[in-house]
Amino acid sequence: MYNKKILFSLLLLFCAISLTNTAFSQNRKIVILKLDDVTAGGTEGVVTSRWQRVADYIENKKIKAGFGIIGFSLAEDNPAYFKWITDRAERGFIEFWNHGYYNRTKGDTIGEFEGTYEQQFKALQLTDSLAKAKLGLQLRVWGPHWSSTNTNTDKALAQLPQIKMTLGSPISPVYYKGYVLPNTLDMEYPVHNPNYDEFLKAYREKSKDLNYFYLQGHPNSWNENQWQNFVKIVEFLESENVKFVTPSEFLEIIKGK
């Protein structure tokens, strides 16, 4: 009986390893669509038509993505906006993540995650706590909004162990013990401008060395031509048989690797 238990345990381990290796095989790259800057739509509606367009696209295609919420948009009661988020979170195609708190403008001389420890911890905690209170969601992933990072970012993140993964930063953390997914491939050239030709060039140069990557985008900035470039990028990746996942799904895969 004891030997049978050992054999059964080994079989389960072998299956888990096999599944993980399959997910990370060269034939099935793992891709996160990192789409930034979710806020309420104001006079345009619950959300803007551009955010509605990309959310509908993701869900209708039944692929996965991560949408970054800027926390200030949760500060005032907005039941329709909150429901828009929670409905999509519940359906499972879109994961919402912590994209900082403040509504930065061009007049701001310093980024949200370039300041003191106290400032950065407050920004992280505000969005985290508002998401729990207003949405009933634990945001397990973070990425900076319109900002570089510094050592204080690393220290502040270490105080929020519920944030299990970050996107792009901090590059070499000392204090933060979660997983940092580096930025290795882009689809916007420059930022806010999806460019299929530039993406394809970079993909062909780098893809053989990449089993997984995220693509950053800013859907609320995209005009019709930019939107069509994004669609072409997604359709190309589908032709490559990639697996689109949410950030937390990726984290579960990498933890099992």
Image (cartoon, rainbow, N blue to C red):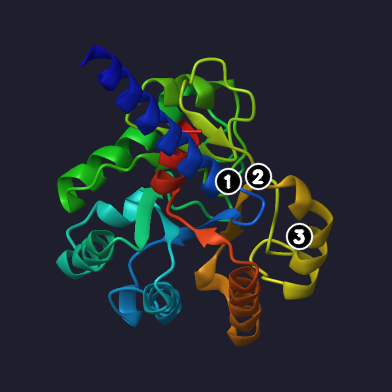
Q: Position of residue 19 (x, y in %)?
A: 46, 44
* Residue at image mark 1: 24
Please determine whether, in this image, residue 166 is positioned above or below residue 26.
above
The quadrant holding residue 236 is bottom right
Q: Residue at x 59, y 43 (%)?
A: 147
* Residue at image mark 3: 203
Label 1 sits on a secondary structure element that is loop
Q: Quadrant of the N terminus?
A: top left
Q: Amino acid at mark 2?
A: Asn
Mark with earlier residue (2, 3): 2
* Residue at image mark 2: 183
Q: Residue at x 38, y 79 (%)?
A: 60
Q: Position of residue 11 (x, y in %)?
A: 38, 31
Name, please, the residue furthest toward the bottom: 224
Circles 2 and 3: CB atoms closer than 8 Å: no
Mark with earlier residue (1, 2): 1
Which label number is shown at residue 92? none
Q: Is 195 on the left-hand or right-hand side of 89?
A: right
Q: Position of residue 8 (x, y in %)?
A: 31, 27
